[in-house]
Image: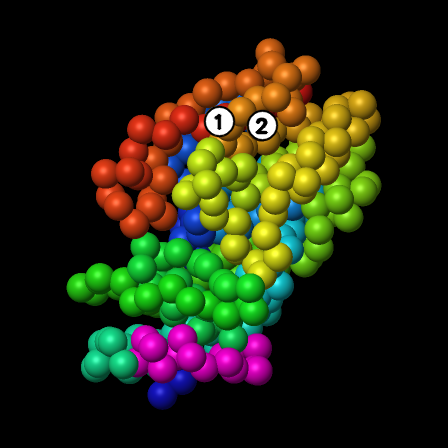
Amino acid sequence: MKQEYQFLSITTKPFVKWAGGKRQLLPIITRNIPEKFERYYEPFLGGGAVFFNLVSQDRKVKWFVSDLNSDLILSYATIRDRVKEIISALEAHAENYFKNPNPYYYKVRENNPKGQIDKVSRLIFLNKTCFNGLYRVNSKGKFNVPLGRYINPNIVNKENLLAISRVLQSKDISIKCQDFEVALKHVGKEDFVYLDPPYQPISTTANFTSYTNGNFDYQDQKRLFEKFKSLDRKGAKVLLSNSKSKEILDLFEEFAEGIIEINANRFINSVSQKRTGHTELLIKNF
């Protein structure tokens, strides 16, 4: 029997849980977003919590979102263009998983599918069932996170996937896989840019930048700071999230008046007691 899909009017939310995701901080971040702008740029898209929150407000804006993680951007494009196939593939994953979670998870983790639907459904399935929903790859680009401890993971959120697909089909939304400097090349006066890079580690044990198989290191943080200054000179409005580390505070010293400290939990720490009590920074030039 052919399934009928109906696009529902629901608020979209991230389809993956991404390390450093911003859902818990949305109330604070949205209070620090300018009321008016004609173009929005987000070059470290990740799970897209801020983007989905803003786009659901029906603003008349051109949206330019991107990320350097090619598997993630492929997932956005595939949900946009082939959502019914993704839902069917995820339903098959869910059926097999609930029959025998442990061996099925590791079987899928070891697979290296070539087809678009298989690649994207694998990424979403692993994200929904792996430990803490943590996306991590090793130096060879191989996903290496163990199985999570879930009783009934929500592998197929059909309504949200359909809503995301509908939103992303807008001609006003551009999604690309590219480095942040390329993504921000055409930013102009009064545009709004939200920057959420992999955070500068606050300790050697806190170093987590492996969202792609090329780490985002301190040289990249300095490159991002230079771009922040360049955008400021152009008259763009820029908001940046990062850790409260000495390196970041020193880099952005000239923008000290625009630094806001916020308390945040970090859900990717393997020790639950260490997920609370962290301070992060919002840095803005307006």
Nearer the observer, 188 or 149: 149
- SS class, disc 1: loop
Is residue 219 at least partly visible in the picture? yes
Query: For the residue marked with disc 2, what is the amino acid?
Result: Ile
Query: For the residue marked with disc 1, what is the amino acid?
Result: Lys
Magenta part of the protein: which range?
104-118
- The answer to whether the residues at label 1 and label 2 have Cβ atoms under 8 Å apart is yes
267 sits left or right of 236 in the view: left
- Chief secondary structure of the magenta span? helix
In magenta stretch: residue 113: yes
Q: Quadrant of the C terminus?
A: top right
Is residue 88 at least partly visible in the picture? no
Relative height, residue 180 to residue 190 (above, below): below
In magenta stretch: residue 137: no
74 sits left or right of 223 in the view: left
**In this figure, which residue is indicated by the disc labeled 2?**
248
**In this figure, which residue is indicated by the disc labeled 1?**
244
Residue at the location (34% across, 77% down)? Answer: 106
| Colouring | rainbow
Give coordinates of residue 69: x percent, y percent: 60, 59
Whole-number angstrom distance, CA of label 1 to CA of label 2: 7 Å
Residue at the location (78% across, 37% down)? Answer: 187
- Residue density around tag 2, few if under 14, some if 14–19, many if 20 or more, within 10 Å: many
Nearer the observer, 61 or 19: 19
Give coordinates of residue 72: x percent, y percent: 55, 61
- Residue density around tag 1, few if under 14, some if 14–19, many if 20 or more, within 10 Å: many
Q: For the view shown, which residue lies furthest in the front direction?
A: 204
Residue at the location (79% across, 29% down)? Answer: 230
